[in-house]
Every structure is written in C-alpha cells, then in structure tokens.
Image (cartoon, helix red, strand yellow):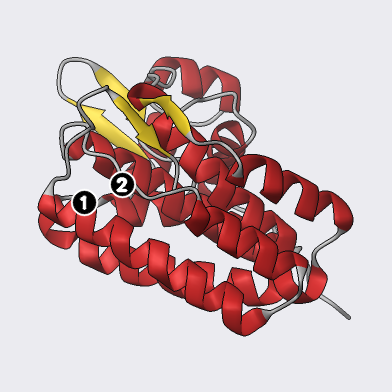
C-alpha cells in the first residue's frame, strides 16, 4: 500500500507564493500582500505565513524592507540566490556560471536548432546601433534566443535565473553596460549555429562573453553618441 504524504499548511502556502511569483501575479519590485491579507487568502495562521515568507527571503526571492513591507526580489530561488552575489566584486562568480550555461546552450543549439531559431538569431544579430537605455534588453534577447534554440526547458529556466542577476548587476554598476562589440560577434554565433558548427559557435560565444565580463569589471562607458553597437 502506497502512503501519500499530505502537504502541510506551510508547504502549501510556500508553493502558492512561489506560483504567484513564477506566474507573474507578483512581479519583481512590487510589494506582496500583507500578512493579514495572506492569512485570509490562504486560510492559515500568522506563523505559517511568516515561515513561508522567511523561506523565500532566505533564498533571495523576497526582500523585507523595514517600514515598507515585503517585496519580490527575484522570480526564482536560483535568481534570488545569485542575486546575493550581484555586487561588482562578486560578478566574476556569476559570469563563471553564466559562461558554463551559455557554452552548453551553444553546443545544444548547434544540434537542435530549427529554421525558425536560425531566423530569429539572424534578425537579432543584425541589430547594430540602439539607444543606450535599450542596449541590455536587445543584447540579452540574443542570448535568450541562443538558449531557446537549445530546446532544453531546464536550461531555459536556469538561464532565466542568471539573467535576472546580470540585469540587476548592470544597475549596481550604475548603468555600465557590456562592451561596444561589433555586430560580428553575434553574427558569428548565429551563423555557426545555422551551420551546426559547434567549434566555431563556442569560439565566438567565448569571445563575446570574455569581452562582456571585462567591460563590466572595468566599468566601460557609453560611446559619446549615447548609443552602442550590439555585439
């Protein structure tokens, strides 16, 4: 006879809160409902609510601001944990993890990419000058497309957690963005994936990741025109 374990009120509350965040009902930067509101919605006591919040706070998903309430800091536990290392001094550790994930994504993309994946990669790689305030979104869109082309849902979730931290780190470094790379870097990756050339794709990916890491470490400035060519 198989015994089915019943989830405790704490576990149910924790799962519900995680779902609110992952589904987008609670967005990053916004305040979550108050303890009394959560008690009413979940039908649990104050201690249960506090334990669930404590757990999500310990992993960096939630953040308690004295006098203001509890706010969403990251969409996933992974993103929250990495967010604790979002200072300039610790960015090298985040980039080591990012490099490992993205290099594997490039390899898988060469094996699994579809014609639509190639089309999207080429379109994103063709983008050159963009306003400085849009650079991060456009640049990360290409990296996300590479991961999507790997067609591995677990890798996609892990990479999403990394990107949250990378984006937050740009803010920590006072708006410093990745280097002014020529579009040939992204185009090189896109074409290598299209050709299913793993060696060429990994070499191109390694090149732009190294330059990105160097730029954030040295505090590269935006070009005089206020625009950056996409790398």
* 72 on left or right of 117: left
Neighbor class of circle 2 (other Cα within 10 Å; few <14, some 14-19, many 20+) is many
Q: Say if 47 sits above or below 103 in the image.
A: above
| x then y, percent, for residue 216 | 21, 51
Q: What residue is drawn where x is 69% and y is 48%?
A: 122
Q: Which quadrant of the structure image shows residue 34?
A: top left
Q: Which quadrant of the structure image shows residue 30?
A: top left
| x then y, percent, for residue 186 | 54, 54
Label ID, residue 56: none
Whether residue 72 appears in this view of the structure is yes
The quarter of the picture where the N terminus appears is bottom right
Element at label 2? loop
Q: What residue is drawn where x is 59% and y is 78%?
A: 200
| x then y, percent, for residue 148 | 69, 55
Element at label 1? helix
Q: Earlier in the sequence, mark 2 or mark 1?
A: 2
* 1 on left or right of 161: right
Q: Nearer the viewer, residue 23 or 64?
A: 23
Neighbor class of circle 1 (other Cα within 10 Å; few <14, some 14-19, many 20+) is many
Q: Are marks 2 and 1 in contact (CB under 8 Å)?
A: yes
* 46 on left or right of 90: right
Whether residue 5 appears in this view of the structure is no
Q: Say if 20 sits above or below 133 in the image.
A: below
Q: Nearer the viewer, residue 45 or 30?
A: 30
Q: Find the distance from the CA under tag 2 to the CA under tag 1.
A: 6 Å
* 35 on left or right of 198: left
Q: Which quadrant of the structure image shows residue 198?
A: bottom right
The residue singled out by tag 1 in the image is 216
Farthest residue to the bottom: give it. Answer: 199
| x then y, percent, for residue 91 | 22, 59
The residue singled out by tag 2 in the image is 178
């Amino acid at each position: 006879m198989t015994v089915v374990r019943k989830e405790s009120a704490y576990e149910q509350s924790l799962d519900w809160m995680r779902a609110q965040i992952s589904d987008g009902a609670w967005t990053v930067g916004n305040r979550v409902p108050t303890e009394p509101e959560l008690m009413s919605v979940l039908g649990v006591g104050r201690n249960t609510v506090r334990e669930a919040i404590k757990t999500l706070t310990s992993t960096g998903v939630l953040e308690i601001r004295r006098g203001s309430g509890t706010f969403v800091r990251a969409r996933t536990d992974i993103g929250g944990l990495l967010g604790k290392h979002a200072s300039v001094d610790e960015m090298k550790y985040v980039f080591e993890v990012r490099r490992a994930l993205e290099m594997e994504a490039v390899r898988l993309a060469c094996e699994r990419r579809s014609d639509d994946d190639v089309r999207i990669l080429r379109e994103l790689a063709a983008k050159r000058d963009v306003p400085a305030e849009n650079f991060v979104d456009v640049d990360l869109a290409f990296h996300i497309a590479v991961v999507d082309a790997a067609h591995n849902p677990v890798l996609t979730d892990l990479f999403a957690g990394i990107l949250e931290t990378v984006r937050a780190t740009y803010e920590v470094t006072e708006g410093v963005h990745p280097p002014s790379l020529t579009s040939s870097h992204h185009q090189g990756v896109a074409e290598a994936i299209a050709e299913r050339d793993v060696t060429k794709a990994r070499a191109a990916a390694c090149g732009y990741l190294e330059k990105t890491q160097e730029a954030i470490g040295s505090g590269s400035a935006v070009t005089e025109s206020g625009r950056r060519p996409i790398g």
